[in-house]
Image (cartoon, rainbow, N blue to C red):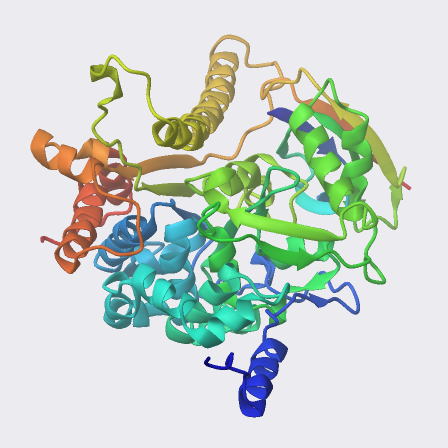
Amino acid sequence: MPRPSVPSGAAILFGLFVLGCAHAPVNAPLDRYRPDAGYRFAGLEPGDNTDSLFVVLTFSGGGTRAASLSYGVLKALSETPVLWQGKTKRLLDEVDLISTVSGGSFTGAYYALFGDRIFSEFESRFLNRDIEGELTRALWNPATLIRLASPSFDRIDLAAELYGRTIFEDRTFAALASRPRRPFIVINATNMSLGERFEFTQDRFDLLGSDLSSYPVARAVAASSAFPILLSPITLENYPSPPGYERPEWVQHARGDYNLNRRRYLEAKEWEAYNDKADHPYVHLLDGGLADNIGLRYVTDSIRDADRPGGIRQLINQGKIDKMAVIIVNARTEPSERIDRKPRAPNAAEVAMKTATVAMDNYSFETIELVKDIADAREQALRSVRDCRALLAQRCPAAAPPPALKGMTFYIIEVNFENIADPGEREEFLSLPTSFKLDPSVVDRLVQKGGELLRQSPEFKALLKDLQGAPTAR
Amino acid sequence: MEYLSVHFPETRRVLIDGRDQGRTDRTIELEAGTYTVSLSPSDDVKPKKRRVRLSRTSPIRPKEITFAKT
């Protein structure tokens, strides 16, 4: 009778060594609150990038499909010369802010870290790779299986390691802060407990009493794309507030204004939840798409909310912005629906898929409408003031005119598959899968389509006309 | 949005809850709610701070508040 195999001493030592290494990086505590240090929008030098032309990009979720489409838009912007304030430059060099979710976070983070290197590296480093296959193979590696037995190492940590090693060169947010130039990248995840958007910025990490500088960018991207069930959540520690950090004045005001402004009230409540270290010692993060799958909510909040440090509202109130373009790259699909063709009720998988996506799609649609409403309301306010001043000057010249409102033009530009003119081609793109593995020929078409859809957008054409630029012929 | 116009005999920066939100005699756009308004520099300003509640304003009729020079 064969004897049961006994692990050799070397194998046991190896196992213990691997288990000992099975610790994912944790976020570091902040020793002191420094409002002018760390990765913050206000900390980035604008350089040649003007405030007066303020360009925002948002990259949606949708795996490699979303990453490719947003890369195509970046490429098109790099090929678009504009004339602004006497200088001819690439429109890409005027991009101030990129807000990303899930698949779109790979493109945004890569560009923020490496700039134009993206145009020679990103396709081979990410878009044309079988990330899913690589993750699966890494998962079944014996050393990985031992590490996964540790409570402080999970599937998402494996993914973050792979992204860090093979895509982001193990850079941390200190690398982004030290560049230090725009665009500012906002990588969005979802706080599981609060059900709210969570962004990887020092302003947000201040709330956790944590220093973002030493945190790997790859872990933020992994959190942003941690699709529920397939990948485990990423966990952050919520440390005691550092010396010097105090409750902002707006929180106290907002808590008393529930009936006047519920959104502000809820933001204050969220601030207090993070500040309740005893009740929330940890923060668990999942795919950013659960809270906002197009990355636009950070932008709408920043346009509206004067409480946000270094936000867009502050620049508007300071009269710094003349033109603001928001380019929404939305890789949403709409697979051909068959459930209504069958008499039987949808099965559990179909129900689960609808449960996960219906609310997300509706919310994305309403968010895009919201930013359009904000832009329309601003233009209407401007028209009202101008009309009132003109009427008074004409009919009642002795009356004091209302105070002037700073002129500002919005351009809300949406890149999505719905705008593909050819019905067959539209259907084809709307049926693409969400995965981290696409055929290189599909990636090429998505990259090309991103540029085409941007150039054909009426709002984009209006922006270029106003900037005395024209898209280069393709 | 709500609209606020802050007056002072000289041009000063307007701080809303401690953040620079533009200048005196310019319309400042804020969400509805309660705010603490102050000026910078504030050495010769009276009062140092004012609390305002913004609601039902319009761009044509913003809420107007005035600080005095001491």
- Measured from the top left, where is residue A421 in percent x and y? 12, 32
Q: Position of residue A17 (x, y in %)?
A: 59, 84
- In the rendered view, tell whether residue A471 sits above or below residue A394: below
Of the pair A116 and A16, the residue shown nearer to us:
A16
Residue at the front extreme of this rendering: A1
Residue A30 appears left or right of A67: right
- Residue A466: image quadrant is top left
Instruction: Report whether A177 appears left or right of A246.
Output: left
Q: Residue A160 in the image: state x and y as whole percent.
A: 48, 65
Residue farthest to the top?
A395
- Residue nearest the viewer, comparing A425 with A399: A425
Q: Position of residue A387 (x, y in %)?
A: 46, 17
The answer to whether residue A170 is visible is no
Observer-nearest of A134 and A259: A134
Q: How many marks?
A: 0
Q: Farthest residue toward the bottom?
A: A10
Residue A109 visible? The answer is: yes
Q: Residue at x 26, y 60 (%)?
A: A78
**Residue A22 found in image quarter:** bottom right
- Identify which residue is drawn at 64% across, 24% down: B2
Asked if A335 appears above or below A445 in the picture, the reply is: above
Left or right, A441 with reference to A287: left
Residue drawn 41% across and 42% down? A324
